[in-house]
Amino acid sequence: MNPAQTEVLVYFQLLADDFLIEDVTHRLGLMPTETYKRGDKSSYSSRPREYTSWSLSTGYQPSFDVNDQLQPIISQLRGKETILDDIYDIYDDMQARFVIVIVMEGGQTPSLLFDLKTIQFANRIRAEFDIDLYANPYEEDADFND
């Protein structure tokens, strides 16, 4: 990640207590960017994973508009709405979400607008939005700690 420029990461994630990752991959006809199973060791924590996950990601990219990363993920999922419905029927605790991670540098904030077509698609595939914001450089307010 380039520490001098604002970057955006977007991924679509399917998660549940347990499901067959290979089955979801086959049904969707998409190769996931990352998968893990419940109980697997996490790369960022000593605690094991709490759920099974299948995700499709852009990776971190310099950006001033979240849609530059979100729309390519959505375009891979368009036309797969009924397949996702079938997956949700098979794995009844399955959840879907679009995760957006924004790492802002020097106060440079990207546009974060979801048009109606994006909102309708997310609703159609029963996906929530999870947005994480990180502002760099981060300095604690000295007056706040006094």
Image: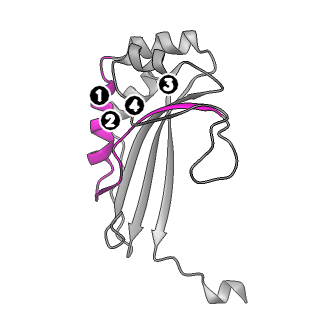
Answer left or right for 28 relative to 18. left
Compute the Cα span from label 4 to label 3: 19 Å
Q: Which residue is mark 4?
A: 32
Residue 16 vs 47, above or below: the answer is: above
Q: Secondary structure at mark 4?
A: loop
Secondary structure at numbered mark 3: loop
User: Which quadrant does the C terminus fall into?
Assistant: bottom right
- Sequence-earlier tag: 1 or 4: 4
Q: Residue at x 70, y 85 (%)?
A: 145
**In the rendering, at what x and y percent does residue 140 appear?**
59, 81
Mark carried by residue 140: none
Name which residue type carries label 3: Arg
Labelled pair 1, 3 in contact (Cβ < 8 Å)? no
What separation in Å lies between label 4 and label 2 (alpha carbons)?
11 Å
Residue receiving disc 2: 73
Residue type at the position of mark 2:
Ile
**Alpha carbon separation for disc pair 1 and 3:** 16 Å
Give left or right: position of 50 versus 106: right
Boundaries of the magenta span: 51-79
